[in-house]
Image: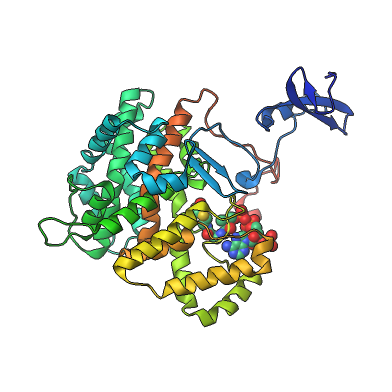
Amino acid sequence: MSTETTAAGEVAGTQTLTITDNRTGRTYEVPIEDGTVRATELRKIKVDDDDFGIMTYDPAYMNTASCRSSVTYIDGDRGILEYRGYPIEQLAEQSSYLEVAYLLVHGELPQQAQLDEWTHQITTHTFVHENVKEFMQGFRYDAHPMGMLLASVGALSTFYPEAAQIKDEELRYMQVVRLISKMPTLAAFAYRHNKGMPYVYPDNDLSYAGNFLSMLYKVAELKYQPDPRLEHALDVLFILHADHEQNCSTSAVRSVGSSQVDPYSAVAAGVAALYGPLHGGANEAVLRMLRRIGTVDNIPAFIEGVKAGEERLMGFGHRVYKNFDPRAKIIKKAVEDVFEVTGKNPLLHVATELEKIALEDEYFIARKLYPNVDFYSGLIYEALGMPVEMFPVLFAIGRTSGWIAQWLEMIDDSEQKIARPRQIYTGGRGLDYVPMAQR
Ligand code: CMC
């Protein structure tokens, strides 16, 4: 291709990248749009007609945008997180989880009547089919609640077979409402199963977070009254976890959803991804780590172990944030509010000292490792009376609205097709089968 370029690499108003293939001496111009080049453009770069063309190799998607999205904005260097353009700090302080869920799903803040209708819909779809209860009862007494959530949310697709019609806007919307409303019910049933306690049906008089607390903790009282401060702290945690653009679990939802499967199955994939210790399981790992460290005296030895590569400081570091995770700051404040109600957990002292020491240490400074959302959230969950196994489950409840918003966006995106990465094949070729006796 021969086109005149300016010093800024602009051709007729379009920014381009000029690439010279040193194998052939040929030069190519690739358009740059939004600071990005299309990987498929590189396929034009070939040695000869039989050549497949250049591919990009990007394990773990370190530098690959897989979609266009208007749901969540993150500036990792400056510690900025916005849902649909609204800063997380303002949403955490002034909004509610259900309003944030509306914002993520619909793209704009609701009018009062719209919020009332949305809240009514979510509140009146919290019940699950009685067979779901029996399904839950099939698990071992000590089954991990995240495994139970993963299985039961996937199982919902069998209760709502019409969910497979993902092109039908009305049916699609129904599943959005069902997913957001039933996640806390499934999560609470999993918790009660572990406790050997009867499942508690939803209470439609209570808020989203309040009803969840009721389904977890109600015993013999006629009506469970959540402490408004704890109810509020939980609501804030749901807001903070609601979306985080193309993270591991959201990518899983999009990737699985790109096969046009129903949203329950796609969300089950998200729950599965969130189960892992490097993603939603990190808050559980943080608490185990804090318990293992035990006292402030043991911190220096622990930090040395981390620096020697023997272990990781869980709750620190992030693929995107190379500055403070803005959610960690809000959570730190919420920890203090919750401890006012529940009394202080001595592990908070270990956590704050650990944070202080790590933030002053050259190892963490050089690698831009700061506390992430999981560093303090586990302490709140524990103060709310949750066992560590429930931590990723709580994350999943909040994240459901984000998964769904991203899934809806993908369905409407004409550029999206079934996700299907390429590979660089490194194995053998054309081998002759060797009969067993001759191996
Ligand atoms: N403790 C000690 N060293 C670390 C840590 C940590 N938590 N995180 C990163 N590093 C080091 C890592 O060893 C590497 O050092 P070197 O360059 O000498 O090899 C360097 O920092 C870069 O790390 P990386 O592994 O290339 O970074 P990544 O972007 O692949 O990983 C991460 C991001 C979140 C998986 C990682 O920081 C981690 O494992 N953190 C602990 C687990 C955690 O808290 N996860 C929750 C993430 S936030 C919630 C969510 O989005 O799910």
Residue 194 versus residue 363: which sits nearer the camera?
Answer: 363
Report the image quarter containing ligand 1: bottom right
The answer to which image quadrant residue 119 occupies is top left
Residue 349 versus residue 375: which sits nearer the camera?
Answer: 349
Residue 11 picture location, percent across and down: 78, 20
Which residue is at a point 34% across and 56% down the rendered structure image? Answer: 233
Residue 436 versus residue 108: which sits nearer the camera?
Answer: 108
Q: Quadrant of the C terminus?
A: bottom right
The answer to which image quadrant residue 62 occupies is top right
Q: Residue furthest bottom?
A: 297
Task: Inspect this view and state whether residue 264 appears.
Answer: no
Is 80 placed above or below 328 here?
above
Total marks in image: 0
Is 52 placed above or below 94 here?
above
Residue 230 picture location, percent across and down: 29, 59
Left or right of residue 259, residue 198 in this image: left
Residue 49 picture location, percent across and down: 79, 23
Which of the colour schemes (rainbow, by chain, secondary structure, one colour) is used? Answer: rainbow
Left or right of residue 119, residue 78 in this image: right
Is 18 placed above or below 193 here?
above
Is 282 placed above or below 114 here?
below
Which residue is at a point 48% across and 70% down the rendered structure image? Answer: 351
Q: Quadrant of the N terminus?
A: top right
Task: Inspect this view and state whether residue 113 appears.
Answer: yes
Q: Residue furthest right?
A: 25
Which residue is at a point 85% across and 31% down the rendered structure image? Answer: 20
Which residue is at a point 69% across and 62% down the rendered structure image? Answer: 366
Residue 198 picture location, percent across and down: 17, 58
Left or right of residue 227, residue 327 in this image: right
